[in-house]
Image: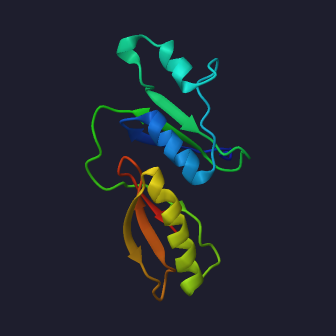
Amino acid sequence: MPSIKQVQITFDCAEPERVARFWSEVLGYVAPPPEGFATWDDFDRATPPDHQGAAYASCADPSGAGPRLFFQRVPEGKIVKNRVHLDVRVGTGLVGEERLAALEAECARLLPLGAVRGRLLLADDENESCLLMQDIEGNEFCLD
């Protein structure tokens, strides 16, 4: 049986380029324009007016270690809770007040980018604390 070498995570969204820029900032990824174009604006100018505003975008870990994220425009808006979400690992190995401080610091960095703070889930007998968040189009993710 062949092993899987890479995985890509795909988001349905209204504004692919905007969401790609958000996740690039969150994860330290790069969001290059389509091949053959220096910028996304150059790509838009080369696209017929009735198709402007990228139908897709992507961002990738510059080290190549993390999965590529792909964003595709869809006509319908988000209606229900995500069935899959990303966990942004900012508190790995931390516990108690130190973990909470790391979660709050990352939350403070993401809010000006358009993230929305959700509920703080405090540690219990099974899990460490995590902070529920939403990206700029309402997709849930966790800071953990």
Q: Exactly how many numbered labels are in the figure? A: 0
- Regarding residue 136, the answer to whether it shows in the image is yes
Q: Residue at x 70, y 43 (%)?
A: 62
Most extreme residue toward the right, as rendered? Answer: 63
Residue 73 rendering spot, x and y as whole percentages: 39, 32
Q: Residue at x 47, y 64 (%)?
A: 142
Most extreme residue toward the bottom, as rendered? Answer: 125
Residue 135 rendering spot, x and y as whole percentages: 42, 52
Residue 3 rendering spot, x and y as whole percentages: 68, 47
- Whether 43 is drawn above or below 143: the answer is above
- Regarding residue 85, the answer to whether it shows in the image is no
- From the viewer's perspective, is 29 left or right of 16? right
Give the camera-side residue of 113 and 90. Answer: 113
- Whether 64 is drawn above or below 110: the answer is above
Give the camera-side residue of 101 and 8. Answer: 101
Visual colour scheme: rainbow
- Whether 126 is drawn above or below 62: the answer is below
Where, by quadrant of the figure, is residue 84 drawn? bottom left
Where, by quadrant of the figure, is residue 134 drawn? bottom left
Give the camera-side residue of 114 and 126. Answer: 114
Give the camera-side residue of 70 and 94. Answer: 94
- Whether 80 is drawn above or below 43: the answer is below
Residue 75 rendering spot, x and y as whole percentages: 29, 31
Q: Residue at x 28, y 41 (%)?
A: 77
- From the viewer's perspective, is 62 left or right of 124? right
Q: Residue at x 52, y 38 (%)?
A: 70
